[in-house]
Amino acid sequence: MTQEEDPTQRNEETVRKEKPAGLSVWIFLFVVVGLAGAVHWHFNTDRGLPVLGSDDRPLAQIEQDESLEAIVEEVVPEKSESEATHLPAPVRESDAVPSPAEIKTSLIEAVAGPADAHGFVLGDESAGTLRLESPAFLAGKRIPLTYTCYWDNISPPVRWGGAPPETKSFILLLERREEGKTPFLVWSVFGIENEKKGLSQNIQPSQEVAEGIRAAQNDYQNTGYAGPCEPNGVVPYALRLLALDVSLDLPAGVSKEELARAANGHIIDAATLPFVHYFRM
């Protein structure tokens, strides 16, 4: 009786001979392909680069193109869907046709620069020779209480010189210039003829003033002189003199906007006298 061979006793050589030769090859290829895929995924997908085969450009060219696209997007932002699909509201006829005064101011500003807080535009061609001073106080110093609401509340005396030869009239403004706030007009007179070299104190026009001097409205909506009246702190003010090459044909009591529109285009020089007010007896 032939003794059967115990399967557990077969040696490794017999096992290797009986295994299919192709199985090891397929296992090896499967492992290699899997490792290659993992390496490719790590060095491409995780780093934000295109998947192999989706872009044939070199890496340097891809980075350069993406930088250019980012610059273009920053300079010319892509319109949103609402911006691309919705047209602006139609312009009304009243908005499309400005008044002659608005056209005049726009043209002057285009040449001479923007208007000041009260609408007056001083051209770049200004002479720069006009000077303004007061015999009652020095530039940059405290104005006496006589010219404030704490005493007589009368307008201060002023004098000027150096007006351009073509000057026909003057405008005198008094404004409060607090830091961080729009200058506030507290007094405005016009119709000052070119022969005059100054004004005496206590010019307080309500409507008509002697010698043709007229008052325009201030930001208090009246035509009177309103001297400094702040009880606390040091408040800056300024007197401004505008030289015009025309005599303004305006009635007393006009608004500052009307005065500015009539003066713009004719202001040939300007001078400023700054001062401060603070209450001290």
Image (tube, grey):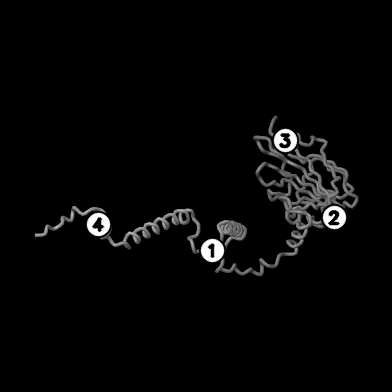
Mark 1 = which residue? 56
Badge 3 vs badge 4, beta-carbon distance below 8 Å: no
Q: Give the foreground label among 4 and 1.
A: 4
Q: Amino acid at mark 3?
A: Trp
Q: Give the foreground label among 2 and 3.
A: 2
Which structural element holds mark 3? Answer: loop
Mark 3 = which residue? 151
Q: Amino acid at mark 2?
A: Ser
Q: CA distance from mark 2 to mark 1?
A: 78 Å
The image quadrant where one finds the N terminus is bottom left
Q: CA distance from mark 3 to mark 1?
A: 88 Å
First in sequence: mark 2 vs mark 1: 1
Q: Give the foreground label among 3 and 1.
A: 1
Which structural element holds mark 4? Answer: helix
First in sequence: mark 3 vs mark 4: 4
Quadrant in the picture for residue 140: top right
First in sequence: mark 2 vs mark 3: 3
The mark found on residue 188 in the picture is: none
Mark 4 = which residue? 14
Q: Nearer the viewer, residue 201 or 6?
A: 6
- Percent position of residue 192, x then y: 84, 49
Badge 2 vs badge 1, beta-carbon distance below 8 Å: no
Q: CA distance from mark 2 to mark 3?
A: 34 Å
Q: CA distance from mark 4 to mark 2?
A: 126 Å
First in sequence: mark 3 vs mark 1: 1
Mark 2 = which residue? 247
